[in-house]
Amino acid sequence: MSAVEKVNVRIRVNGEAREALVEPRTLLVDFLRENLNLTGTHIGCDTTYCGACTVLLNGRTVKSCTLFAPMADGGEITTVEGLSTDGALHPVQNAFAECHGLQCGYCTPGLLLSTVYLLKKNAKPSDKQIRKAIAGNTCRCTGYQNIIKAIRMAAGEMGKR
Amino acid sequence: MYAHPFAYHRAQSLGEATKLLHQLGEESRVIAGGQSLIPLMKMRLARPAALIDINFIPRLSEIKNHNGELRFGALARHADIEVSEHVAEIPILHDCASGIADVQVRNQGTIGGSLAEADPSGDWATTLLTLETSVVCAGLEGERVVPLDEFFKDAYTTVLGREELVREVVVKKPAKNSGGAYLAFKRSASVYATGSAAVQITLDAKDACKEARIVLGCVGLTAIRAKEAEAELHGKKIDERAIARAADAAREAAEPQSDMRGSADYKRALIAALVKRAIGIAVRRARGENVEAGHEYVGR
């Protein structure tokens, strides 16, 4: 069954044009990790539940385990590798570090991107809005309290700029 | 997890999509947002030999407000609908759009895909059946318009022909003094609801019920219109007793199955409670009150 025609997928990842010829069934997350060697995006449940694989596609968060790579063709993608600039952490990353918004760190790349997306749409979210915004990201360590603190802090820091 | 291998085709127009469906035959499927189909393919519960990607068809995600109707392009994403200013006029649509699964799934999943998939636990069918909704289906021979209450045949089965796909979902705006509410109860954000209830009510000049539609979700092979429950409200003052009778009738109309989300008895009790609360919110909204409603889950 390897007779299916491969598809050329071209995307811009973290500002850089990348492409690869892949089987159509290649998931976006595997395209990023295996073809482009961007292993910051994690595979958690692999069943559209946990959000560890969250990336920004054309400015919106998606679960990259639930998209075939050809569907993202021509798109602009931001992964966790694209958040820091010249070695300086993004304010959201900084806030997660400051507030202990992670323990094992497995869910963190996805949570960071969900937070970036939330704060782009809503610079001053209420706690209720924060909880709704990260409802698609599962963390099995923290109990979420420090994640919510980190998001509050990030919103505050980014509001000062 | 990897899906079974498939050939990938990208349609640039609806005409091309229907032609491809015709050429590729039985084993081909249309993919829109993919939030149901891709998980099914990864679990090998679906293994189409070819996918026809309609995501690149221009203008298929537009939301239009014209002539007393809202028209949703098949590719309108739940997230687009959630923030649409047109949708703000019909709160029950906002209830539904803003709570489907989670943020990431709402950014990708589409209204057309949700109806075409016809999952018994889907949110849109239950919500839209309380309104005058029709589905514009595009096929090789042209288009036909199907009222939504004739669209679903069974679980995962619609009247769509092999070579047809949803182009547009048309919702007639409710009359004045109308209000609706959609309540869905789920264990966590990302899962399907355990039970859901959609209620749309129009009040007359004396604050009595002129019109009522009550639809139950997740408790049957398709969404269930609870006509006996509607009859308990019709023409009457909507007081506690009328609401309690409607909730009891809804409990009887539900046909739930016991599964990992709960026993059949539990789901009947849940449905009655959801209907009771949805009627209350619908009536308050019909009177012009601003009330929040939508999906409910632990930690919300």
Image: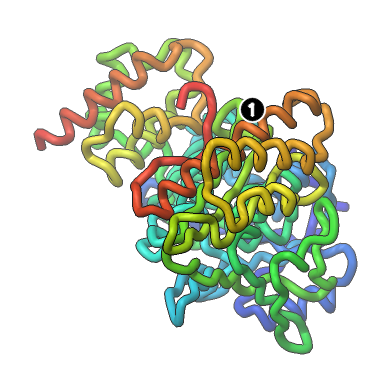
Residue extending farthest to the bottom is B141
In the image, what residue occupies the spot 80% across and 63% down?
B158
Question: Taking A58 as reference, is B224 left or right?
Answer: right
Residue A154 x, y percent position in the rendering: 23, 28
Whether B176 is drawn above or below B200: the answer is below
Instruction: Kindly identify the amino acid type of the residue bearing the numbered disc 1.
Output: Cys
- Residue under label 1: A45
Residue A48 x, y percent position in the rendering: 62, 37
* Corner quadrant of residue B130: bottom right
Question: Taking A73 as reference, is B39 left or right?
Answer: right
* Corner quadrant of residue B73: bottom right
Question: Taking B178 as reference, is A4 left or right?
Answer: right
In the image, what residue occupies the spot 58% across and 61% down?
B211
In the image, what residue occupies the spot 41% across and 46% down?
B284
In the image, what residue occupies the spot 63% across and 63% down?
B112
Of residues B286 and B74, the one drawn nearer to the viewer in this rendering: B286
Badge 1 local density, few (<14 within 10 Å), some, or many (20+)? Answer: some
